[in-house]
Image (cartoon, rainbow, N blue to C red):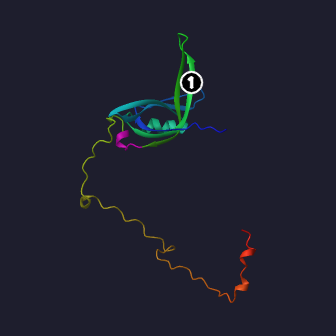
Amino acid sequence: MASVNKVILIGHLGRDPEMRSTQTGKKITTFSLATTERWNNEDHVEWHKIVLWERLAEIAKEYLRKGSQVYIEGRLQTRNWEDQNGIKRQFTDVIANSLVMLSSRRDSQPGYQSNYGGSPPREPREPRELREPREDPAPPSAAAPLNKPAPVVEEYPIEDDTSLPADSDLPF
């Protein structure tokens, strides 16, 4: 029987991503991700350790910051080990294979502190009339006119029904 190991999370980073390299030179980035559920009028936070490899690791390190909101798809991987006192320990990581940044670029800038309550208020914008005019888009190509007439199809009249196959001759 087949099995599925898939995780989908949307949450906020609890700390800035940390990047390191393996002995073979592969890049690996980790960060903690908080997901929040509300029940009984209380927020319940679950923390997840996210692990990204190679190019995804580089992107996360460059663009994500503490408080950034992300969508993660990946799989669960559990590690077992014994600590210094001989006690068996277990830890489950989310190995991400897809990352979508949901925060605005401003939220991901260094030094910006998010309060996990959503995006900060935006600065007021100038009215449309006061903004610099944008360049007009390029005119449509002359090779593809917008109002092109439909092609004319010649009709061939059928003189009698004997030229058509009978229903019983159809294979279905």
Image height of 85 relative to 166, above or below: above
Image height of 15 relative to 122, above or below: above
Q: Nearer the viewer, residue 4 or 41?
A: 41
Range covered by the magenta-colored residues:
102-108
Q: Which residue does the numbered mark 1 point to in the structure image?
A: 79
- Residue 15 in sight in this render: no
Instruction: Say what secondary structure mark 1 lies in.
Output: strand
> As drawn, is 23 to the left or to the right of 145?
right
Q: Farthest bottom residue?
A: 159
> As drawn, is 79 to the left or to the right of 12?
right
- Residue 132 in sight in this render: yes
Does the stretch in magenta take in 105? yes
Does the stretch in magenta take in 44? no
> As drawn, is 165 to the left or to the right of 147?
right
Residue type indicated by callout 1 = Arg
Q: Position of residue 63 (x, y in %)?
A: 43, 39
Q: Farthest top residue?
A: 85
Q: Position of residue 19 (x, y in %)?
A: 48, 30
Quarter occupied by residue 47 = top left
Q: Nearer the viewer, residue 152 or 108?
A: 152
